[in-house]
Image: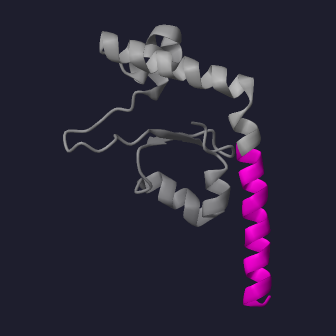
Amino acid sequence: MSKLAEYRALEKSLQEQLAQLDALKNDEALKREMAFEEKLRSLMAEYGKSLKHIIAILDPQTHTSLIKPVTASGRRARQAKIYRNPHSGEVVETKGGNHKILKQWKEQYGADTVEGWLQK
């Protein structure tokens, strides 16, 4: 594509996006959402609450699932993974891939197959 054709295509795309933006600016539903957001943010500031606090109040179960355990170094703690060997019924729980039995399984059955055994 020539530079001129590319320029004209981008210009046309920009004009279409500007038209969509103008249509959204006049949309009543958008105006109501923006007003709601502004009022919510002012209430949060007035009471010294963050979005996390609001989520915890409205949906406590979701809030607890958003909390990630942190180690002393400030990094997120690794999640334990549970692998179940369908051939032997043996279960391995590990936080990393450097587990002796898990390595043996990967050598014997292949890494992709063993990853398919992941339970959690």
Task: Please identify the quarter of the rendering in which residue 35 is found.
Answer: top right
Q: Which residues are magenta?
A: 1-21
Residue 85 within the segment the image draws in magenta: no
Q: Position of residue 9 (x, y in %)?
A: 79, 73
Residue at (20% x, 45% y) in the render: 73
Residue found 73% across the figure and 79% down from its top: 7
Residue at 40%, 57% (x, y): give it.
Answer: 98
- Is residue 119 placed above or below 48 in the rendered structure? below
Q: Is residue 32 above or below residue 110?
A: above
Does residue 6 appear to the left or right of 111 in the view shown? Answer: right
View extreme (left): residue? 72
Judge by depth and name the residue closer to the eye, 52 or 70: 52
Q: Main secondary structure of the magenta part?
A: helix
Return the x and y of residue 62 as percentages of the image width and height: 52, 19
| Residue 79 x/y as whole percent | 43, 39
Q: Residue at x 48, y 15 (%)?
A: 39
Residue 119 placement: quadrant: top right
Residue 67 point in image, percent of width and height: 40, 27
> Tag count in the figure?
0
Q: Nearer the viewer, residue 42 or 53?
A: 42
